[in-house]
Image (cartoon, rainbow, N blue to C red):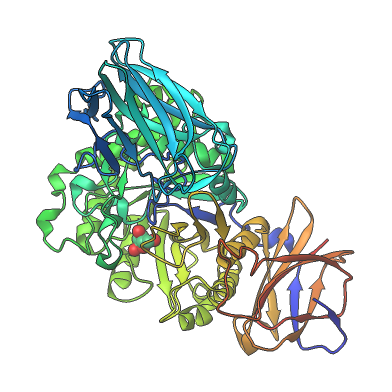
Amino acid sequence: MAALTAQGVTLDVDASRLKKAVKVSPTMYGIFFEDINFGADGGLYAEKIKNRSFEFPQAFMGWDTYGNVALREDGPFERNPHYVRLSPSGHAHKRTGLQNEGFFGVSWHAGEQLRFSVWARGKGGRIDVQLVNPAASGETQVMASQTLDITSDNWERYTLTLTPEEGLSKGMLRINLRGDRSVDLEHISLFPADTWKGREGGMRKDLAAKLDSLNPGVFRFPGGCIVEGTDLATRYQWKNTVGPVENRPLNENRWHYTFPHRLYPDYYQTGGLGFFEYFQLSEDFGAEPLPVLSVGLACQYQNSDPEAHVALDDLQPYIDDAVDLVEFALGDSTTTWGRVRAQMGHPEPFTLNYIAIGNEQWDSLYTQRLALFIDRMRKECPDIKIIGSSGPDSEGAKYDYLWPEMRRLGVDLVDEHFYRPAEWFINGATRYDKFPRKGPKVFAGEYACHLKGHKQNHFKASLLEAAFMTGLERNADVVTMATYAPLFAHVDGWQWRPDLIWFDNLNSVASASYYVQQIYGTNPGTHVLPATTNGEPLTGQDGLYASAVYDQPTGEYIVKVVNINDEPRPFAINLKGAKPESLTTITLSSTDLMADNTLESPRAVVPVTENMPLADSYTIPANSFVTFKMK
Ligand code: AHR
């Protein structure tokens, strides 16, 4: 950034009428989480063992067994009844055991402590627990090993710590039976000791920290399409995701087969990252939790037969789930669901102000069911704000039908989704300028710029998202929440792109879109300031976009400017009603529009922060997103 003397566009920012200014909702910029692209199991949820309870339909998926191994199904956890019995092979030189391949490998850093745990029985039994390098070229495959003695004939939980000296990204966990006694093993688990907030069985620290750094105001979970399920049986049921992890039943993950060209037959949901953990993370991040629940419709894309959905007369348990969720989050420990929360270690209530009913639903199948939810929720939990949906499209027949219906039903917010091409984002900064000011607010619940023929993450898409977001900010009286989607993607196991954060088993990288979200999320302001050029908002004239806010706690005037031209533009800010004394700028730009950050090159497109003298005019570099912070 450099100060210029010649003046191009001047942005008039009016800071003189703060008392009348529109307030920016604290929920304005947030995160949307779904277990897609191995975002939860194999991602944020730090468990390294795949199919730890042998509950996958193919009970040994993820495992190799050798010697005398039998699958049994009368285990100690009623909703996950399978376990394995390891028995001696019958010959001194033959071995019995099993090994797990993890999620695209079991991985560890050099010197990292890994917590192994297992439920076991078989007094006198003994196993070796090993971290193994299957591709070892040296003398031994074994990179860490501990022996575990089983001391009871009753089921008990055993733990040990493995600390391999060398790191490995594609290793495996091996369990060898020793001696002449059989042992039974269930819920075989391996976590890094160093998780987010040091919680045992918790979240991957690097990934959770990246979410925290976005300073999210709202945290939407658990999806997305997985809320609906491919059929009702596989919808997300929050009650199955609370209580001891050992007894949370497995669910299918529709992303294992949604795209036949990206098939992941070993993709299931353990629920290890469940509703308690989602609320806890929301609390960690200081974000409003925003759970999304099934409205009783299986994915409408995949089910045109009305019989696939729950009948109106049978909707009661679904509505119970919504009302009971309020009790889980807010009820005291004398209530049924409040007690479950308290027993999980959170006797104090969580925060809960919003519940979304239905994900991408449409037509009267949706509105009839939603009406029944609203009816009961307004009576039994009147303080909860209800979020409805405008369907999967940003405009068109479904959208046009649903918005009036959402007004008629009196929802508080409407969840809009737009995965749209470049032109849509270029023209999108005015989308909400003429939106009705009365009625439900907008939750831009899923969006991302998808360049035709180039769905990879890249800087140009991020730049257009930044341009579009000036329109969200300017219309903060209508749009009160916005969450980019999807959030996470494993480089070895993605189904959908672009995504905000990419990772492998050991490392992660923030995309350019992430930095756009971060700049908005950490500079949301508290009041919208009128910002105009020749009396009009700057919404793409000469390839420039702008919005302005005031931040009451810091006393900063924040102006966000996007230049989508291939040349720089002179730019002046005429701030009326305030005399700032200092200026900091944050600039995100790249000379390569197709560039983005990768695990190999994580700093290809990163924001640059500079302190600058205040000047009459500045240069907005070609293809850049510049945030001016004036104090
Ligand atoms: O974000 C990926 C998917 O896009 C979500 O699951 C769904 O809501 C939308 O279609």
Task: Reply above or below: 348 against 465.
Answer: above
**The N terminus, quarter of image:** bottom right
Identified at 62% across, 83% down, the residue is 564
Ligand 1 position by quadrant: bottom left
In the visual, does 59 lie left or right of 284?
left
**The C terminus, quarter of image:** bottom right
Identified at 18% across, 29% down, the residue is 70
Q: Closer to the camera, 608 or 60?
A: 60
Give the percent coordinates (x, y) of residue 452.
Answer: 41, 81
Give the percent coordinates (x, y) of residue 176.
Answer: 34, 28
In the visual, does 574 lie left or right of 20?
right
Identified at 55% across, 76% down, the residue is 464
Identified at 39% across, 57% down, the residue is 37
Q: Closer to the camera, 53 or 110?
A: 110
Which corner quadrant of the image does residue 376 belong to?
A: top left
Which corner quadrant of the image does residue 60 belong to?
A: top left
